[in-house]
Every structure is written in structure tokens, then in C-alpha cells.
Amino acid sequence: MSTAGPSLVSIRNLVLEAATPRGTARILRGIDLDIGRGRIVGVVGESGSGKSSLAACLLRLLPANLTRLGGEIVFDGTDLVALDEAAMNAYRGRRIAMIFQDPMTALNPLFTIGTHLVDVVRRRHPGLGRADALARASAALASVGIADAPLRLRSYPHELSGGMRQRAMIAMALLVEPDLLVADECTTALDATVEAQIVALLEGLRRGFHGSIVFISHHLGLVAQLCDDLCVMYAGTIVETGPVADVLARPRHPYTRALLACELDDHAHGGRLVSIPGEVPDSVAAHVACVFAPRCTHATPACRASVPALRAAGPDRRAACLRLEEIA
Amino acid sequence: MTEDAPLLAFDGVSVVFGGRVRALDDVALTVRKGEVVGVVGESGSGKSTLCRVLVGLTPPSAGTVSVGGRPVRALLAEGRLAFRRRIQMLLQDAVASLSPRMTIGRTLAEPMAIHGLPRDEAQARLSAILRRLGLAQDVLSKFPHQISGGQARRIGVARALVLHPEIIVADEPTAGLDVSVQGELLNLLLDLQREFGLTYLLVSHNLNLIRRVTGRTVVMYLGQIVEDAPTRDLFAAPAHPYAAALLSTNPAVDPDRRHRRIVLQGEIPSAVNPPAGCRFHTRCPVAQPRCSVEPPALVDLGGARRARCHFPFSLDPLRH
């Protein structure tokens, strides 16, 4: 993607498979993605497209029924896939941090917000005294717009509102001063006016935060507003990537086009609503054809005979479609 | 019931839970036959309680809900089944709302058996509705796990329609649906509405959906209706500051159509102890001293619009 110099993360042919009673589920089917330094990469896709699994791979927080994790995730020169558990721990919560979808389940109900934050600070800066750590925690809470931070440090998660809990989660992630921040649907559980507050907060934080962000969402409008780059996923593959405004203005992959056509926010009132006929493919199906071919209006026999590569489709743009040139 | 009497009428309806939580507060709303009315608001605004009061699941603590000019309380007393045939709910998660132990045929036949329809009449209705929804007859012998998600959603619609209701209450019908398939469901619901002259009360968080499919929108905040207007007019120019803020939170994909976002302070207060005066004054960007003392009434602003605000935004420059 459009970045000066090498990217922070280079994901190459990332494959994730898990055992299920029905057979091997292909959760990620060969992901290639670069995350530029200081860029916000929005990852969109329908449920089951592999967005959250991709996030889980970046932290290697993977379920136990996993049978295969292949390919590489080169993070600042180191392949995270090849690291052993102890070495991976040196990255988690130090160089890579995550904001989860539901702050109520991500925070421990038995500990105060202060304990959560101080733990993070002392993990990041082991030599720091408790008073200094508390001061940093307090400053972090204030920086995410929580009034009366010293008081809130003594609060338990259940004493805070949903919006405040998500702010506290963001403060925890920022205290890590990570090179990479992964936000998985971090506003989905919030009400609309609170979501607007969190998005405004994230936009404001961009100025002080120099790391990269992977922002996972199913809300295209939100991604369009917040992100630099866009990555569109479908059935465990990336179908299109590129600068967000460019991709949304001129989508190249038939799936991206269809997805944008389904958005309800155009002016036409009373007209027919658009949907993509058919269903997302079964994850246990073999991967021998274009994953979108069964629902694609442009599909030909060739599309059902081979897997299309993610290839160049204009400046900083890539798309995985055999017929890019024909259907442009 | 006279020709122009409203099909649904809420008159001063309040619901108080446990003597303290005012889930609905003095709701007045009328819906004419054939209208598609959207209800929007954040969690805790009373949307679901409004639905429950309408279908008779929650009795109102004060006020009256009427259907076809007669109070729901009286209709329920005369015969629960006769009332329930008139109003059906479309449940949120179609797949989860189907019993995994029952075939689709049994699931669809059950309401007709409960309502005492003769077997051949039930059979005829079932065939007709399946044909209309484009489902093959063999779906009846299948179990929920054997059908696709799209089919399950249509079965959910079929189940709501077999009793030939007049009113459909849909609580978040597209929640959890991917954008690629929500259009299909909404098209179906709108077609059926026109064909059978149905009246819809449609509750959703999805503002784009409300804008596309409803004729009128009701905005709720802390158990009260704060604005009620024709959908097109509301989205063009909201009168209530809360409606304006809520609508502005909906970012458009197209950057040229993105408007300035109004970011409210704080969160929706507790319904146990709502603010005095105007319930929205604690978060309102244009609140005046009067707002914290004197509760505003839901006032008619003309143009089929009502708003509960002492200082509604002027609509004149934007009126079209």
C-alpha cells in the first residue's frame, strides 16, 4: 500500500485452518497484506470473512482447535508465525496492542480500572514505581476524555458506562505505546451517539499516536471516514486493497462493487434495494476457484477453474479478479 | 372504526417498571392503516417497550393503546387469539427463532392450529405463502439446520404472515444481517406491505434503513418521543437537537455527502432518575436555563411534524 519506505507488517500467504466436526475449516486462505507505518488500515467484510481471525493472528491469540497456521507475518523484520510462545509474549502488550469489541468482557470485573492500567504501564516499563505508574495511568484516562481521572482509577468496570469502559480500553492500549494497534469492531457494541464520541476520539488521537492501526469494522461509512487504506475481505481471502477514498470511488473487484451497491445511503428513496444473491461459501469447501464466483455476475468458467491472484490494479491498488481488465 | 380513524393510537402511554423506571413516558402516537413507521433511538430509549405494549405483552401503567379504535385491554379481554391474529411480530434472529426440533412445516402450521384454522384452509394458506415467497414445497419437510440463512429469513416472514395480520411489528429485522443480504429481506417486506396493505412499525438502529424504507420516523429519547416527522423531512432537516445529533452520527461512504458530525457529551442518562425539565438538556448543545426547569411538550410544528423542544431548529430555510 502507499507508504514511504518498508511497511511495518508484511503478511505473506497467511493460512489458518481449524478442525471442525464437518471437516477442516479454511478460515484464512492465503492472505497477502502490507500495513504501512503510521497508516490506518480498515478491514471490512461480511461475517465469516476472516476479519477477526486476521486480527487474532497478528497477536497469535488463536483457538485451540487450530490445525494449521502457515505463511508469515513479518513484523518489523521478525516473522511472528515462527516465534515460540515466550518470544511472542514479548510482542503482545508491548509492541502490539488490541482494543476488543466488548469492553465489559475484556475488562476483569474483580479489578479496578487503575489496576488494569497500572499493570499495562509496569509491563511496558518494568522499572517504574507504583506512584509514577499511577500518574501515567491517570494522564492516559484524561487523554481519552474521562473526567475526574483519579476517581475513575478507583472504579470497577461495572461502575462505568459502556462508553467510559471503551475509553478505558483505548487508554490501556495507548499506554502500551504500541507500534501496531488492532481495533476489532471497537465501536460496534456502543450506541450511535457514543460511537460518534469514540470515533472523534480516535481521530483526535491520530495526531499524538505514531503507530499503525488495523481498524476492523463492518461499517463502510466509518472506515471511509477514519482510515487511510482499505482491505476488503471475503471468505478468508483479500479481494481488494488500496487507498480508502480511491477504492470506494472506483472499486475494481466485483465483490467490492456489489458491497458498495448494497449500502443503503444513496439518495434514491423508494427504489429497489440491492443485495448480492446467494450465500457466503462454506468454510469447509475446497479452495480451487475464485471464492466469489458463485455470486458474481461477471463469473466465467475460467473463474471456477482457478484461484485468482491478488494483483496490481492501478497505483497502490490490488485486486483478486481474473477479469479485472475486461470488466473495468 | 371510521374510514380515517387511525389504525394504531397511543394516548398518553406510560410504562413504569418497579415503580421507578419510566421506560415509556407519556407517549402519544397515531399510525394510519398502510403506513410504514420507523422508530429510532439508542438503547434505553423505550423502543422495545413501545413494541411490547403494542402487542399486549406489557400492560401500560397509564394511558391507552388502541387498535382500530378499541383499547387493547378490551380486545385482549374479548379474546386473546383474535387480537394476536391482528398483530404479529417479526423476530430479530430468524435462524434462532426456528425450533431446531421441528420441521419447517410444523413450525409454520403451529400458529394456524393454535388459532383453530381448519386443516384444509391452513394447507391452502401455507401453499400460497410459500409460492409468494419463492420457497419450494419440499422446504416443509426440512429442519432449520438444513436450510440456508436466506430461506430461514423468508420462513420467519411466512410465519408472521400465515395468520393474515394487519400490523407487523419488526424489532431490528436486519440486525446481524450482512449488508449483502439485507436488501433482499427489505424488498420482500416492502412488497408484502403494498400487496396486503400491511401496517409496519419498524424499530431499527440502522438509520440508512429507516431512511430508505419508512414514510415516517419517530425519534425516541429516554422513554419519550422527541420528534415525529415524515422521514424525508426529518433527514433533510431535523427540528430536535437530539434528532439532529443522532442523524449526524451516520457517516456516509461518499465523502461529498458527509455532513458535520455533532458529538454529544456524555451518555443517555438513567431512566431511574431522568433529568428534570427537558430530559435531553444535560447533553443538549443548545440548552438554555429554561430547559433544565420546564419540561417541553410534544408540539405540532406543522408539516405533519411534532417535536418536544423549547427551541426547535428553524425549518424555514430548508423547507422544500
Image (spheres, coloured by chain):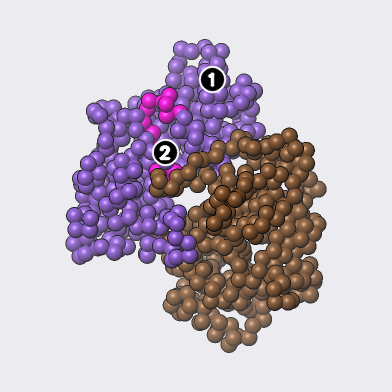
* Relative depth, front residue between A139 and B234: B234
Quadrant of the rendered image containing residue A35? top left
* Relative depth, front residue between B100 and A127: A127
* Label 1 and label 2 in one chain: yes
Q: Colour of chain A?
A: purple
- Residue at image point 61% right, 76% down: B163
Residue B119 picture location, percent across and down: 60, 85
Kindly identify which residue carries mark 1: A139
Residue B311 vs B149, above or below: the answer is above
Q: Is residue A210 a member of the stretch shown in magenta?
A: yes
What's the mark number on residue A196? none
The chain in brown? B
Residue B200 picture location, percent across and down: 60, 66
What's the mark number on residue A226? 2
User: Can residue A13 be seen from the camera position used here?
Assistant: no
- Residue at image point 69% right, 46% down: B309
* Relative depth, front residue between A294 and B240: B240
Quadrant of the rendered image containing residue A182? top left
Residue A48 vs A301, above or below: the answer is above
| Quadrant holding the C terminus of chain A | bottom left
Instruction: Determine contact: label 1, label 2, CB under 8 Å.
Output: no
Of marks 1 and 2, which one's residue comes earlier in the chain?
1
Residue A143 picture location, percent across and down: 52, 24
User: Can residue B309 be seen from the camera position used here?
Assistant: yes
Residues under labels 1 and 2: Cα distance? 25 Å
Which tag is nearer the camera, tag 1 or tag 2?
A: 2
Q: Which residues are magenta?
A: A205-224
Q: Secondary structure at mark 2?
A: helix
Provide the chain ID for the residue under circle 2: A
